[in-house]
Image: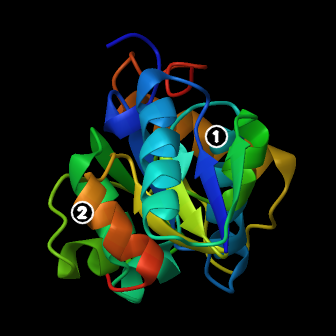
């Protein structure tokens, strides 16, 4: 199907929790950084929570979903799964040494999350593969 | 009515734009059609998947091309 991500071919959607804590901020910035580089596409967790059908339809057609949670509350994963989305990969920042309240959203911490997220997605989801 | 079609220019994106334009004309709607092809601008809209249809600022469809009947309903706000 070429390199266009239209219709969800080889496209991972990224759902950071974007929570209020420092680790929530890291999830948000990491997802934005990955999205800008074509490493998946950041999507709105809040939109899922509002039962937005266009997004839920798109999420079901995506190659996979990556929930990025800042703490063990796992809000992103739980929100996706509670809306019937089952193809969810999960990255929790506390599992990679980023503790809530002790992890400012520095470039180094954001890069740490990106580096942990990339191996979770198949090699095909590399730079520019999501976009024409 | 402002209709925006977000997509980098693949056949699906063009089909979505054509379908939207045809449905709007058939319904006699006053509309402005804008095609957004720049990927960074598309990312700025926050759509999860292209092609996407945005009507008056609201994302109606992502990642697929509705048929003519569905498109007409979307543009008329019936769906």
Which residue was labeled with disc 1?
Answer: A34
Task: State the image coordinates of residue A46 (x, y, percent, origin top left).
Answer: 50, 82
Residue B50 in view, yes or no = no
Closer to the camera, A119 or B4?
Answer: B4
Q: Residues within 10 Å of mark 1 (few under 14, many from 20)?
A: some
Work out whether residue A64 or residue A113 is closer to the camera in this orientation and state it. Answer: A64
Q: Work out whether residue A67 or residue B35 is closer to the camera in this orientation and state it.
A: B35
Q: Which residue is mark 2?
A: B69
Disc nearest the viewer among 1 and 2 = 2
Q: Position of residue B68 (x, y in %)?
A: 29, 55
Q: Secondary structure at mark 2?
A: helix
Instruction: Judge from the rendering whether residue A105 lies leftward or rightward of residue A36; answer left or right.
Output: right
> In the rendered image, which quarter contains the C terminus of chain A?
top right
Q: Position of residue B38 (x, y in %)?
A: 76, 34
Label 2: how many Cα within 10 Å (few below 14, some 14–19, many 20+): few
Residue A25 image-quadrant placement: bottom right
Q: Residue at x 38, y 52 (%)?
A: A66
**In this view of the protein, can residue B13 be seen by the observer?**
yes
């Amino acid at each position: 199907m070429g390199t266009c991500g239209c219709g969800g071919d080889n496209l991972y959607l990224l759902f950071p929790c974007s929570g209020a804590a420092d680790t929530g901020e890291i999830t948000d910035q990491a997802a934005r950084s990955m999205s800008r580089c074509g490493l998946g596409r950041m999507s709105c967790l809040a939109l899922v929570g509002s039962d937005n059908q266009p997004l839920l339809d798109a999420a079901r057609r995506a190659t996979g979903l990556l929930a990025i949670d800042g703490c063990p509350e796992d809000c992103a994963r739980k929100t996706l799964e509670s809306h019937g989305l089952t193809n969810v990969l999960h990255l929790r920042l506390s599992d990679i040494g980023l503790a809530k309240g002790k992890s400012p959203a520095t470039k180094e911490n954001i890069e740490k999350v990106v580096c942990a997220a990339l191996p979770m997605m198949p090699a095909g989801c590399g730079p520019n593969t999501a976009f024409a | 009515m402002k209709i925006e079609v977000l997509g980098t220019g693949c056949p699906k994106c063009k089909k979505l734009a054509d379908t939207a334009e045809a449905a709007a004309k058939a319904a006699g709607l006053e509309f402005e059609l804008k095609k957004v092809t720049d990927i960074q601008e598309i990312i700025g809209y926050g759509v999860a998947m292209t092609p996407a249809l945005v009507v008056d600022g609201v994302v109606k469809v992502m990642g697929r091309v509705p048929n003519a009947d569905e498109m007409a309903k979307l543009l008329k706000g019936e769906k």
